[in-house]
Amino acid sequence: MTTIGKMTDGRLVEVVKVVDKVGFSEAIGWVLICFDFDKEYSRRLNTKWVPISTRFEWVRNFFA
């Protein structure tokens, strides 16, 4: 299962992981998103941690 979300600026991203704490911040609630999810796992380089308050237009689960 893959979770895909559409950000408010129109970009499609994969929601990789949702965690409470990360090592680089004391804030609680983080989401790891991948911008180039259409590539193989070994070639995905464009990932980013964003706060849980980040807005998405929609988030859907896809089954492969």
Image (cartoon, grey):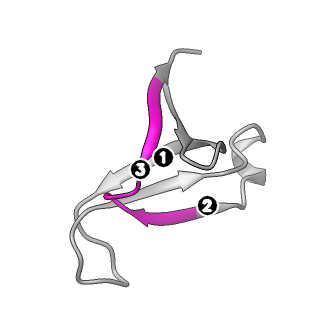
Residue that carries the numbered disc 1 in the rendered image: 16
Let me know if residue 63 is in the magenta part.
Answer: no
Q: What amino acid is at disc 3?
A: Arg
Outermost residue on the top side: it is 63
* Magenta range: 48-60
Could you say which is closer to the camera, residue 40 or residue 18? Answer: 18
At x 76% / y 41%, what residue is drawn?
Answer: 40
- The reply to whether the C-beta atoms of the residues labelled 1 and 3 are less than 8 Å apart is no
Q: Report the Cα–Cα distance between label 1 and label 3.
A: 16 Å
Residue that carries the numbered disc 2 in the rendered image: 47
22 in relation to 47, above or below: below
- The reply to whether the C-beta atoms of the residues labelled 2 and 1 are less than 8 Å apart is yes
Residue that carries the numbered disc 3 in the rendered image: 55
Of the 4 image quadrants, the one containing the C terminus is top right
Instruction: State the SS at label 2.
Output: strand
Which mark is first along the chain, 1 or 2?
A: 1
Q: What amino acid is at disc 2?
A: Thr
Instruction: State the SS at label 3.
Output: loop
